[in-house]
Image (spheres, rainbow, N blue to C red):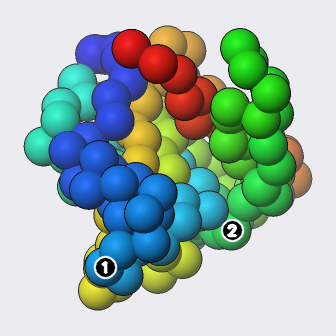
Amino acid sequence: MAVGSIVPNEALAELAGLAVDSGSPSAFTVIAVGSGDTTPAVGDSALDTEITDSGLARAAATITLATTNTANDTGQLYKQFTVSATKTIKEVGFTNKTVKDATGEEWAYREVITTERDVSSGDTYSITGKLVFSRG
């Protein structure tokens, strides 16, 4: 399994639009999980293999600001899924649409996780994701 994370190119334009209120940007407030393990690349525009059933379909996250280096420099997303069938989770991503392949769908982040997670009916699977902004 390839491991890594990436902020895709499409996220840069969406984030710039949000920063200056230009165009029709949408905030990244949705978490999705998948079973794909292809190495993330800057050209990614979706998860490799998104899981759309079994209680693991993409969903709106609870959004907060957190502090990593400077006050409120981190957007934090949290979601707890209740699983209804056996699945293997290998990737996670943050998007701006609750419907897969929706018009205007953009991805802020995609990661192939270092330790895949097998889940079964009745399990809960929680994700806390962070988008940290820093000078660089």
Residue 6 shown left or right of residue 55 in the figure: left
> Which residue carries the number 1 mark?
23
Q: Residue 42: which numbered mark, if any?
A: none
User: Which of pointers 2 and 1 indicates the residue nearer the eye?
Assistant: 1
Badge 2 element: strand
Residue drawn at x 55%, y 15% is 115
Q: Nearer the viewer, residue 132 or 33?
A: 132
Please state which amino acid type lies under the numbered disc 2: Ala
> Which residue carries the number 2 mark?
60
Place of residue 130 in the rendered image (x, y in percent of width and height, measured from the top left): 64, 33
Residue drawn at x 81%, y 58% is 62
Cβ–Cβ under 8 Å for marks 2 and 1: no
Residue 101 shown left or right of residue 108 in the figure: left
Residue drawn at x 80%, y 27% is 71
Neighbourhood count class around disc 2 (C-alpha, 10 Å): few under 14, some 14–19, many 20 upward = some
Residue 49 shown left or right of residue 114 in the figure: left
